[in-house]
Amino acid sequence: MKSLVFLSLLLAVLSTAPPDDRLITRNGSISFYSKAPLENIEANTKTAVSVLDKKTGQLEFSVLIKSFTFEKALMQEHFNENYLESDRFPKSTFKGKIEDLSKVNFDKDGKYTVVVTGELFIHGETKSLVTPATITIHSGTATATTEFNISLSDYKIKIPSLVKDKISNSVKIVVNLEYGNQAEQLQIKN
Amino acid sequence: MKKKRWKKYKFFVLFTLIILGTGATYGYNEYNRLTPNTHHLKPLFKINAEEFLKQFEANDSEAMTRYVDKIISVRGIVGYTNVTDTTATVFLNGPGSLASIICEFQKDSNKEPQNLKKGDSVRIKGICSGYLMDVIMVRCVMDEQWLNK
């Protein structure tokens, strides 16, 4: 029911902008990497939901923590149970905006470097985020990409003392959101 | 004297070595255990897309408790596919619902849905990871045993 409310709110937000102004993806890619002496940690998901408003530059994305997949089973178990506590905090979200939206011409193919600011919510903690991002327009399709580092301690993600020296506190997050317009997204329905 | 002492402790030393060896092997194997191939996993639930979505839309916390982390085989109509060299995602539609079931395929099965077309009836097996705007399934494979049944 809560998700239905979330969906309704999202649709309500979307409905305030003309249909052509909102870009949406439900198939966004988010990966993270952590380089560490013990072992590199890497996981990704292709199921992030994101909305970008072309007129206001408002950008949001949301992802389920349990949708991140790992190669090693034990790593995935530790990630969900001990680090991100995904039963308590099932999703992570970002709400922000493109600060210099005037640089982007959504009607012209090209790569536009912008600055995105907003609030990143992970593990029950919300922190401000400022990151450079690239908006790529190719044949009418917009793709937003960015990479940034977060510190696990900022989000109160505890590393057990036994492996504290062997796991990096810094994690690189890579976001790749390829948008269609909302009408296209809804066309995939029956 | 030394021989006598060795004899006395031989069993204990060998027993300790066996325990340590077994523990180390178990630890090594456990550490390197890969996430299982979904093809080899038996689904706990077999359900159609419409019913699956209805349950999440009616009461998502109840549906999450029932389905999250479980292996589910879902029958549905393909609404959209996105297959790349390394990834594959299939949207299964639920008639009459705004939401879909988004199935992200496991890495080595990313070619399995490449010939699917919109409107195909399929069964996909995967692990339910929850509900955002859609129900999300990960590590999916084509459930060939149930294809088109």
Image (spheres, helix red, strand yellow):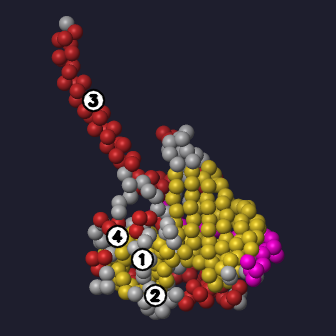
Mark 4 → mark 2, Cα distance in angstroms: 24 Å
A131 lies left or right of B148: right
Q: Earlier in the sequence, mark 4 or mark 2?
A: 4
Under circle 1, the secondary element is loop
**Contact (CB < 8 A) between labels 3 and 4?**
no
Q: Quadrant of residue B141?
A: bottom left
**Considering only vertical position in the picture, is B141 above or below A180?**
above
Residue B118: numbered disc: 2
- The chain holding disc 3 is B
Q: CA distance from mark 3 to mark 2?
A: 60 Å
Discs 3 and 4 carry the same chain letter: yes
Q: Position of residue A143 (x, y in %)?
A: 66, 73
Dot 3 alpha-carbon crowd within 10 angstroms: few under 14, some 14 to 19, many 20 or more: few
Mark 1 and mark 3 lie on one chain; the one further toward the N terminus is: 3
Q: Residue at x 69, y 88 (%)?
A: A20
Q: Chain of mark 1?
A: B
Label 1 sits on residue: B113
Dot 1, crowdedness within 10 Å: few (<14), some or many (≥20)? Answer: some
Reading the image, the residue beneath label 4 is B71
Q: Earlier in the sequence, mark 3 or mark 4?
A: 3
Q: Amino acid at mark 4?
A: Ile
Residue B61 seen in the figure = no
